[in-house]
Amino acid sequence: MKPLAVSHYTVTTACGRGNAALLDALRSGRTGLHHGQFEAGAMDSWFGAVDQLDEPLPEEHAGWDCRVNRLLAATLQQDGFMQAVASLRERYGAARIGVFVGTSTSGVQQAEFAYRDRDRAGNRLPQWFDYNHTQSIHVPAEFARLLLGLSGCCMTISTACSSSAKVFAAAARAIRAGLCDAAVVGGVDSLCLTTLYGFNSLQLVSPEICRPADARRNGISIGEAGGFAIVDPQWVADAPALLGYGESGDAHHMSTPDPEGRGARAAMQGALDSAGVAPKAVDYINLHGTATQANDLAEDRAVYALFGGVVPCSSTKGWSGHTLGAAGMVEAAVAMLCIEHGLIPQSLNTEELDPLLRGAIVTRTRAAGIERVLSNSFGFGGSNCSLLFGRLT
Amino acid sequence: MKPLYIHAVGLAAPGLPGWAEARPVLAGTQPWQALPETPYAPQLLPPNERRRAPPGVRQAFRAAEDARNASSLDFSQLAAVFASSDSDLAVMDRINTALAEPVRAVSPTDFHNSVHNAASGYWGIAVGCRQPTTAVGGYDGSFAMGLVEAAGLVHGDGLGVLLVVFDVPPPPLLRSSRPMRHAGSIALVLGAEPDMGTGERALARMRLSLADEAESPLQDAALEDLRQGNPALRGLPLLRAIARGEAARLVLPHVSACNMVLEVEPA
């Protein structure tokens, strides 16, 4: 593929709002995860919450008010992103800029509140519940389109934890097919009981802080996050770029990865092929690395099969938690920060490296000149996506 | 943009149990008639997955399997796009009901069925598809949204694509929040060329564009009720044009600021 400039991007996670907060956390090794209850009465867990989302949306957007939309609106306020989209709009026109957003749970938290408040005798949800502007899976994309003043094609991708990696692929092919001239892509997911108790029912929530690649890893820590990026087919000086993408299906199981990692390998190979580069051109791999036993082992098999044990790799979920539908976008931002600032982050919280893993897991953050970063995102239903980021040359 | 060729069609809607049965109705040579609605057991799923598949997934499979049964293509080689407004609100209803109780005992099967890409995951397992599979959701504009992603995969990535658009009505508690009268699903096999290597010629071709124009209704009252009663069946005007072998210019809902124009012709 022809590289696509990522002219602007912004990310908000439990490490703070905006790119500088995440970069600072990556450099200092400060996790955004905390222990406790993210909502009164919820089970104790380690989780990554974004601070100060208690304020309702302003009056003009009151109908959209819910945690995921507050997080989305807060995310868009950082790093001059709104202004960057405004100038993109002047260049291409609002109708020629696509919006592609990944989410796994959208505003389902509103439904959780509504079910608790329901009239049990009359079997009715409370009047205030507004499915169309909160719970519907399409809500974040539609709200982002509204806030950004765009009127072109619009897509919500919801493939669980690969959702907001796949938005880059969908935008790239839509541009190539002529459906839009440029695109805003992003991902957002907020904390909710559905994912906490859902992953817990599968025994995938760790009682300790998540420890990717650790011999004693015991599951995920859930986080919330938002992130957005502008992908632009025109050359943009000094911008990072999407060089390639690969997607695959596992065809294996609904909630367990193929233990051989065949789908993961196919996605990584696809990203390399579409960029036209060999495995040795990759300087760092940001792993999906959820810290479940099954994921980290299957992903390692795939990485080792393709790269051997030489390319440095790590999961950054020890900082942000697993941000599910936003993870692809968060880790795309990590990849771009690493390229722009010359950084290879460690596998945070990893104490005792799993001897069964053969990939070159990074145990101490270091400075390094890096040209290309591969970022993996894999989801339930065997939905895999790998993105290759680098520089425009 | 370049045209998309339609190589196979699948359909499941009230009174329209398959594409073969629906063709004369959509062509106007037979009247629409209500038929008893029967639960559908997907043919291609292994027994464990068949048992666990919720109604939304079954509805998606019904149209996908209808298209596959009428085609000689190898469906494991097609990329797949599953588009749905709500996937399966009965699953979300059970989870939210459980979460409102003190114990909060969410069923693990419900949780893995709750992801919006449940149908695409089951489909990959059913046909052994390792190609890119995607799940999109665009409320009442889900059909057009699915076409955007399918067009990208065909013309941006050079893949043959199975597009499946489906939805099922919500459970009672959510009916006023998300009104939907009918279950329905439509499947299309789309490619860049009039022949996908089978020697069979495409049924029709279409060009997509976006415009702020009003969506096209259907004249037949029963069919218009179906069209309005389910986001997937917003695609019925396209199937009507294919059934009639007619050229047509159709507008489908996409998002609030722009709809999708389809210029359809016999291939």
Image (cartoon, rainbow, N blue to C red):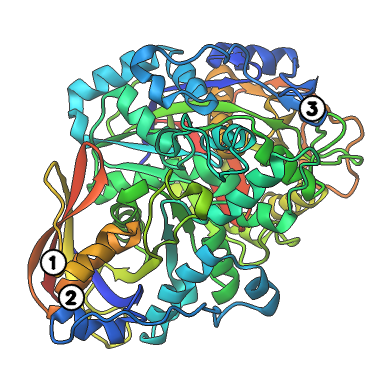
Q: Position of residue B171 (x, y in %)?
A: 52, 55
Do the residues under discs 2 and 3 have CB atoms within 8 angstroms?
Answer: no
Residue at image mark 3 = A46
The amino acid pointed to by label 1 is: Val
On residue A81, the disc is none
Q: Position of residue A267 (x, y in %)?
A: 56, 54
Give the quadrant of the C terminus of chain A. Answer: top left
On residue B264, the disc is 1
The amino acid pointed to by label 2 is: Ile
Q: Earlier in the sequence, mark 2 or mark 1?
A: 2
Inter-mark Cα distance, 2 to 1: 8 Å
Task: For mark 3, give the secondary structure.
Answer: strand
The amino acid pointed to by label 3 is: Trp
Task: For mark 2, give the secondary structure.
Answer: helix
- Which image quarter: residue B30? bottom left
Q: Is residue A379 left or right of residue A206?
A: left
Do the residues under discs 2 and 1 have CB atoms within 8 angstroms?
Answer: yes
Q: Position of residue A265 (x, y in %)?
A: 63, 56
- Which image quarter: residue A223? top right
Vertically, is B5 above or below A387? below
Vertically, is A205 above or below A81? below
Residue at image mark 2 = B242
Mark 3 closeness class: few <14, some 14–19, many ≥20 residues within 10 Å: many
Mark 2 — on which chain does it sit? B
Is residue B2 visible in the rendered image? The answer is no
Q: Position of residue B151 (x, y in %)?
A: 29, 57
Vertically, is A315 above or below A297? above
Tell me the residue at 64%/21% (across/down): A343
Q: Is residue B10 left or right of residue A114?
A: left
Tell me the residue at 60%/23% (across/down): A369
